Image: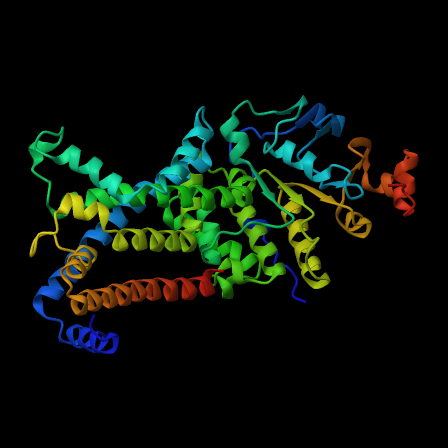
Amino acid sequence: MAEAPDWRNEQACVPDGKPGIFPLRVTGVSFEVAGHYLLDDISFELGSGPLTVILGANGAGKSLLLKICHGLLSPTRGAVNWQSASKVRVRNSQAMVFQRPVLLRRSVAANIDYVLRLQGLAKPERLRRIDACLRMTGLSHLGRRGARVLSGGEQQKLALARAWAVRPEIVFLDEPTANIDPSATLFMENLIRQFSRAGTKVVLTTHDLAQAKRLADEVLFLHQGRLLEQAPAKQFFDGPENPLARAFLQGELPC
Amino acid sequence: MQDLGAVLQTALKLMLELDDSLLEIIFLSLRVSLTATLLAAMAGFLLGAVLAVWRFPGRGSFLVLLNALMGLPPVVVGLMVYLLLSRAGPLGDFGLLFTGTAMIIAQWLLVTPLIAALSQQIVADLMLEYREQLLSLGASRWTMLQTLLWEGRFSLLTVMLAGFGRAISEVGAVLIVGGNIMHHTRVMTTAIALETSKGNLTIALALGIVLIVLAFLVNAAVTFSKIYAKRLYG
């Protein structure tokens, strides 16, 4: 399997001279549907540095929390605040890759071009970024192919390339490797590490312990809509404080 | 009553010869119905997409009305347009009654609700699939509307075909506002109605066959383009 290329030189996440959008402060966030709390009083703060993994079993509320942080959903209670006061700045500094990415019915290159147009970039810059993103994700030879006829792994790489193209300060990844094979998973994980090393804050959800161990610098453990633990990865995996987190690591967490 | 086989034979001969008066009727039919369909598509796609993407008070009632208008009787539309365009009507000064333009207006009124209602459903379904992704990419409502119309282009082509089918096949409205004047406003459906009433079944049948073949060709061209494009873009 090909190694993901190093693209640290390709990225400058925080525009020169402008303050970043971090920290992200989530305060008392709850999300209720028909009297049932899917998220219950969640508070945490994320800085710009470490790669954060939101870990938890299926139905823990990981994707929901990610969508609320990204601004796609509003919490029933509580607030999500960024350091930057500019809503436009905050919006343009984020990207998200969904578990099942929705690609547009147009070519691979045009999918990346779409988001760059939304950012109002001029054509030469768009072409440069498209070329760079396709090379980095190993999709250069597929640039003119229809995005929706790609394999699942290629589609997920394209989704990542599209997210990366806007040079976000933070990228939310919602179980990005849940539907792809092990080889494509390793390639994606290499890319994700490259993003993180290049300075982009990565927040990733997964229920895959092995993946969390491979990628995480910091872990948020979620169970049945509640945040039970936030800790550095080593500390969490060596000996979590919460008994339910310990049970999850041992594969004994009750549903 | 003429023998059906003989009628068919004469009809085919007429079609193959394609005399000038027949060609004139065919071209006028195509001009009127294609123009009405294209104009209806422009209005209908936009209206349907707006109703799918935006939420506003009265939207539900508007949708019910739009769906009801899909079944608008052509003669009623013809009558309304007649009253609008007649000398005593509010648009009488334009002198459009018994012209091709009047027929285009009548067909446009018939086809627009059909295209708008079907487009609304298509774009609303796409909205469910694309909404979060497009919001995540930073698309505004207006950009979302444009994107969804483009993403639904293959299905919307089928909607256009349905609109064209309704336009080219209707007779009531164009008969009332066009008047079925030879060399001026005679189209295939009105010619078929006239020739049948005169007992000229051969000509009526020839026109009927041409109408079916034309509808088939237009549908085939669009369908094959759609299949090819879907293979490319999924």
Q: Is residue A132 above or below residue B108?
A: below
Q: How is the image coloured?
A: rainbow
Query: Which residue: 71% across, 42% down?
Result: A51
A25 or B224, which lies in front?
B224
Query: Which residue: 15% across, 63% down?
Result: B199
- The reply to whether residue A12 is visible in this rendering is no
A142 or A140, which lies in front?
A142
Q: Where residue B27 sits in the image (x, y, percent)?
A: 16, 60
Left or right: residue B225 versus residue B214 is right
Residue B57 position by quadrant = top left
Image quarter (top left, top right, bottom left or bottom right) of the N terminus of chain A: bottom right
Q: Is residue A104 above or below residue B226?
A: above
Query: Which residue: 34% across, 41% down?
Result: B113
Image quarter (top left, top right, bottom left or bottom right) of the C terminus of chain A: top right
Q: Where residue B198 sits in the image (x, y, percent)?
A: 13, 60
Q: Where residue B31 sits in the image (x, y, percent)?
A: 18, 55
B75 or A73, which lies in front?
B75
- The reply to whether residue B188 is visible in this rendering is yes
Farthest front residue in view: B1
B136 or A196, which lies in front?
B136
Residue A172 position by quadrant = top right
Left or right: residue A139 versus residue A58 is left
How many circles with numbers are drawn on the protein? Answer: 0
Residue A235 position by quadrant = top right
Q: Where residue B157 sits in the image (x, y, percent)?
A: 37, 54
